[in-house]
Image: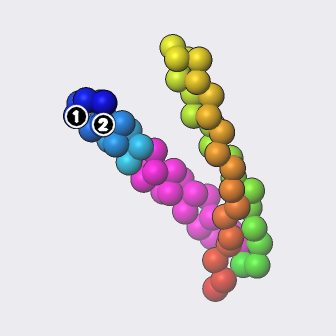
Amino acid sequence: MSDDFNMSMRKFLKQVGVTSQQAIEEAMRGADTAGKSFEAKVVLTIGDLDLEHVVTGTITGQDD
């Protein structure tokens, strides 16, 4: 794969990771999350490539 491809993919994935973390932290801020777990799902789609990739996981709330 080309350097341009690798750089553009890394830039996109970094943006996804950073903005997703910020959104999760904002949603959990001020909420009672202690001792709770939250099921999370991310769906990545690229329409022109007929791609749908699903990632699921669990996020554990922060104990105060």
Q: Position of residue 38 (x, y in %)?
A: 74, 61
Residue 26 seen in this snapshot: no
Helix, strand or loop for disc 1: helix
Q: Main secondary structure of the magenta part?
A: helix
Q: Residues within 10 Å of mark 2 (few under 14, many from 20)?
A: few
Q: Quadrant of residue 34?
A: bottom right
Count of numbered circles on the image: 2
Residue drawn at point x = 38 percent, y = 48 percent: 14
Residue reaching furthest to the bottom: 64
The quarter of the image holding the C terminus is: bottom right
Of the 4 image quadrants, the one containing the N terminus is top left
Marks 1 and 2: in contact by CB < 8 Å?
yes
- Residue under pointer 1: 3
Please name the amino acid that badge 2 sits on: Asn
* Residue 42 visible in the current orientation: yes
Q: Position of residue 44 (x, y in %)?
A: 57, 34
Range drawn in magenta: 16-33
- In terms of depth relative to the viewer, which is nearer, 5 or 36? 5
Q: Is residue 44 above or below residue 36?
A: above
Left or right position of 2 against 43: left
Q: Is residue 33 left or right of residue 3?
A: right
